[in-house]
Amino acid sequence: MQRTFEIDPWKIVTHDLDKKNKRLQESMTSIGNGYMGMRGMFEEDYSADTHSGIYIGGVWYPDKTVVGWWKNGYPKYFGKVINAVNFDKVNVWLDDLKVDLAKIAIKDFELSLDMKTGILTRRFTVTEQNKNVRFTIQRFVSVTQKELFDVNYRIENLGDQPVTVKVVSEIDADVFNEDANYDEKFWNLQTKEQTSNAGYLIAETKPNNFGTPQFTVGMEMTHKTDLKSVEQPDADQKVVNEFTGKLEAKQAVTFEKRVVVVTSRDYDDEATLKAGMQVLTNKVSDEPYQKLVEDQSQAWAKRWEKADVQITGDDAAQQGIRFNLFQLFSTFYGEDKRLNIGPKGFTGEKYGGATYWDTEGFAIPLYLSLADKKVSENLLEYRYNQLAGAFHNAREQGLKGALYPMVTFNGIENHNEWEITFEEIHRNGTIAYAIYNYTRYTGDETYLKTKGIDVLTAISRFWADRVHWSKRNGVYMIHGVTGPNEYENNVNNNWYTNLLAQWTLKYTLASLKKVSSEKLGELDVSEAEKAQWQDIIDKIDLPEDKKLGIFVQNDCFLDKDLAPVSSIPKDQLPINQHWSWDKILRSPYIKQADVLQGIWYFIDQFPEDVKKQNFDFYEPLTVHESSLSASVHAILAADLHYEDKAVEMYGRTARLDLDNYNNDTVDGLHITSMTGSWLAIVQGFAGMRVKDDTLSFKPFLPKKWTSYQFRINFRERLIEVQVNQSGTKIHLLKGDPLDVKLNGKALNLVGGR
Amino acid sequence: MQRTFEIDPWKIVTHDLDKKNKRLQESMTSIGNGYMGMRGMFEEDYSADTHSGIYIGGVWYPDKTVVGWWKNGYPKYFGKVINAVNFDKVNVWLDDLKVDLAKIAIKDFELSLDMKTGILTRRFTVTEQNKNVRFTIQRFVSVTQKELFDVNYRIENLGDQPVTVKVVSEIDADVFNEDANYDEKFWNLQTKEQTSNAGYLIAETKPNNFGTPQFTVGMEMTHKTDLKSVEQPDADQKVVNEFTGKLEAKQAVTFEKRVVVVTSRDYDDEATLKAGMQVLTNKVSDEPYQKLVEDQSQAWAKRWEKADVQITGDDAAQQGIRFNLFQLFSTFYGEDKRLNIGPKGFTGEKYGGATYWDTEGFAIPLYLSLADKKVSENLLEYRYNQLAGAFHNAREQGLKGALYPMVTFNGIENHNEWEITFEEIHRNGTIAYAIYNYTRYTGDETYLKTKGIDVLTAISRFWADRVHWSKRNGVYMIHGVTGPNEYENNVNNNWYTNLLAQWTLKYTLASLKKVSSEKLGELDVSEAEKAQWQDIIDKIDLPEDKKLGIFVQNDCFLDKDLAPVSSIPKDQLPINQHWSWDKILRSPYIKQADVLQGIWYFIDQFPEDVKKQNFDFYEPLTVHESSLSASVHAILAADLHYEDKAVEMYGRTARLDLDNYNNDTVDGLHITSMTGSWLAIVQGFAGMRVKDDTLSFKPFLPKKWTSYQFRINFRERLIEVQVNQSGTKIHLLKGDPLDVKLNGKALNLVGGR
């Protein structure tokens, strides 16, 4: 655990420029608006360790795969949301002193991300060379005008001597990705033009050999300042504007840079893109800065009104949940159905901003409750639209049906480790499960019957081909898989995978009964095929140990040396940073919920003692070194009345990044697992379930807290749940009356408090 | 199967310039002298698909590893014997016509590698532009002067018109490895100098980040010809000499290029290297070409005298065994104890010319019989000298003792797939087994007691730490391994691996009783340690299926769909070129002998019915897609009197490259598995064994053959075995009388025929 920011219910704030943990601070102060986002690097050059990263949703590059030894079925490229053309660069000189916070003396530093508004503020006073100049710098990516980035400098001379201020603002196409496989750069400059106080630059992603689209981005900067512009010579890969002026003692000046960012995702060709960029530039130029800030604040306020979770009695917990919701919404608010939710959002390069099963497993349950129904439907459609890619992936392995990818932008598998690529196929089950989850929550079967059924049928065909009949055992088996626990690879009969395969087949058979005859004709599922699916449902191996009363994670698991996590010396944790991969694979330690993930998915279908025995067996073996682990354990612990364990697990999921639990937040935030803290509160502490069209709650209040409350959408209603020491209150804020259950008892909600 | 060369008992010859299979022809006509070697590319530029490759033993570069996702315990670099500075380049113009066999019209082509002498001859007549010019080009790397490469052109104008001949000879440092991980070049030019008819060039391998040595090579060329030299301008990365002359009708001219190649492996610094290069150049310059050819022929004749295997009645079989012995000796004849035997020798880049367990498993049994005892001892010492690396490899995995590498130059693991790197640990058993094999064959325990015991103890300590106690089953297990069958990865309790682990511990305990008390003190094996080893010996899991009467390859193997190889459609073979890796891993198909490899190692210790049941079970599941598979099957089939199967398997091993069985000879020859054909004849058909200090034979004659005979060294004797339709004759050609067994009966060999 490493806490570099202060506890504050609404802010991510520090007064320490922590040079050793600069990258960690940058990850934590990332901002985004769904369309684009950036890490919290400084605008000015910082001549020590830093990671400058700006990313634009859906603008990616297929980087040629690196593998030890390429074999048939391996993906050919690894897609990456690439580090965009750098448009936030601003450098400042005070007389001859370059403002480089890695080098010069400063005081009164503050870095503060206001989650209420999405505005990042940085303050410091330069004291080098006996100067006394105060900087206040605010930046944001606009939620109301998604193409707009704004950074505003206020520079105040607190000293007694005049200071000459020089500001150089740039857009620079010479950027690279730290995770480029072959140290290549990914951008080609197309055109650029600069005047004395504005400039634009259009760049294109490099051509590739894989037939995936190239992207063009256009960026135009304008400036508002009382400083005087100074014509600059043409620079190689960038546009540059310089401004200068004299600041008398006690005098202040402001300098605002606005950048409009457009891409070929929204414009057909370079000419319309350029025209569109200029229209937008003109539009935003008219707005006063204060108006932009107000719009931004109001837009975030609206989001919070629907989604805020309030906790009293534990500010750290409060800060955690807000930070998670803030970063989630900054990454994805459902506005663009072509996009999805990358595990690192716009906050880093590792995992490449691509789409993982995290979306269906962890994000959709949250968006179902916190956003318009359409948002979740868009996320489902994203997969429907990528069916062709999923068919391709299965075909590459010589299999029928659809195999959804582990990592993708376009439906084609991108991951470059075989033990994941074609072994971690449980993801296919979660894609199916999300359709069920959406249908169950919304009560609306339209999507299921029109598009969902195509996906379900294709996935079922995959499972039916991927199993094999083991004559010796008289069962169907699934060999050669990796479960959610990636600390075991290439195992046989992973209980979770087999369960999801069986469940998908069952759900598909049941759903086929509901669709139109026209649709049935299209799907063309023969009676023989259905019979085969039923046979697999009936005879699939679901390993169990009767004596221990548990489901067995996979064949041979119980042959291991089953010492609990508590026996590992503390200084060897996390094991993935201290142990060889060999030692990890052979150990019994579980990276993230595996059997328990399956129990969570179908939490109402297992008897309490079964849930308990499995939890008691697996939890002590789990190291939670995936960010997706703690939330599942929090929910199950709450379900089993292990309240302390539930609260402990909540702490890990809510403050995973804030407290850098897994010592890897330096690479970026764990965006998709940020849903976990919300799930832990809502499904865990409040025990929310939807079963047979009925919403129910079984809340408890963590000991340390004095209250918590949250709001959810449910079938055209807005509902508020308040839990405090005197009990639970459920309010229907909007919509028609509704019957719910509270602690097993029926409750009729009517409008008003 | 693809046969591109003619059947000939002593030659690898073709009269077809097969442009589609140019690389295959190049692999097949590779030459080498242990010190250096080259593929059979032409001297002249060939403007179509070709792979020019020259390699110098022990001159390697650590190329930064490519892996999908680096984890602790993965190697940092992959060592490669790199494509050397290109010194064989010669270009010829006839008037304005450049001799480029990819383009110009020729007739009477012949490419012929004479295995009696190691000389590669190429003949063709240029007919383009109505010319009629005959070329005869001979080249060899000298066996008597290892630094010498010689190529000799005879150009004869058969036409009626005079022709102007221009010859340009070069040494070029601008070369690249096709298998470079990051498309980097590996050479830096240091110095060069050229006169009008000679030149030298000194280059160094690039610096690296891994602390492995850089190598310097020096190459000096001189020429003998009646053509006139023409001064050439200085070229960038090369030295160039040009010669020209007029060839009247019916006139011929010769052009000979000699290159001396020296390296920093033999010289301390650049000055001594340069001096040494010039001394050698002067030395070889004095020799007439015919003398060099005679020396070469005599040296090869001596080798054949000791090692030739003669087969009558089957020229294809005869050619196969000679080709294999020829290429093996070209790669390694035991002269330099710092070198080992790369799986592709000097014939290609894949597998990088590094050291694999092939040496101990397959090559030492041959060298024990065909070369001086010292050669095998040198090969054992190579591992002894790399103990530090083996300790390092184990430590990287968090384990005690020594883990010999899968791929290495210096003892440090180089392979870049985790499923091999730290899982294919059975290799450690073979390193130990080779010490036993050497001791058993030579009857000399000196090596065992002085150096071998250090290696055995270190390996035993590794095994003792690598097993784990499975409480549930009351046995020691070895999880997370890959057996010799690389078509399954990350399996548990591979019978072969567990057997070798058990055997190593047993053999080490027994050997410890033989060593000096001083040595015992050094080794410091405690009583507790010995007791632990004994406990593992007693309680290690050796999976067996009593009902089937077989050893089980590994846990879960029998759960697979066990359809035999004969059920795979022919057009899907080899499966590694047609199936996804996913499909292969889940299939029951065995790449190479696994259980059967263990049975071969201890062939006299298993009852016949056990051997038979295992062979009958596993052979039909084996695809033999490793070149190391067929020989083991040939030996076991012979042992079990499956004579047809033995002969079929011999054919596959003997002509693996000549008939391109696995469709991959294009990448280079399968050098280390070339021992297999010899093993198949000697251990298989002739049934040679050494047990309790006694040499024994149980020969049979393959139906198609009329006779075969071979010679072996055994304990200071040279013995010849002749098998024909009337029986077997064994002659003691050199050395003291010896008792051997023939078909179970004692036989006293005395000198003479």
Image (cartoon, coloured by chain):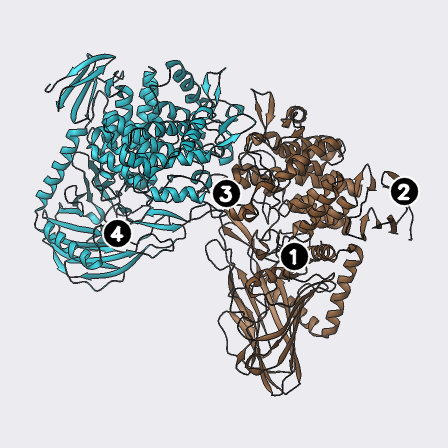
Chain colours: A brown, B cyan
Q: Chain of mark 1?
A: A
Whether discs 1 and 2 lie on one chain: the answer is yes
* Depth check, front residue: A378 or B16: A378
The span from disc 1 to disc 3 (Cα, nearest Å) is 27 Å
Percent coordinates x, y for residue B254 in the rendering = 12, 48
- Cβ atoms at labels 1 and 3 below 8 Å apart: no
Looking at the image, is mark 3 or mark 2 earlier in the sequence?
A: 3
Residue at 44%, 48% (x, y): give it: B66
Q: Amino acid at mark 2?
A: Leu
Tag 4, which secondary structure?
loop
Whether discs 4 and 3 lie on one chain: the answer is no
Q: Amino acid at mark 3?
A: Trp
Can you tell which mark lies on residue A482? Answer: none
* Depth check, front residue: B211 or A532: B211
Q: Which residue is mark 4?
A: B86
* Depth check, front residue: A93 or A477: A93
Above or below residue B737? Residue A701 is below
Task: Mark yes or no: residue B619 visible.
Answer: yes
Percent coordinates x, y for residue A517 in the rendering = 75, 32
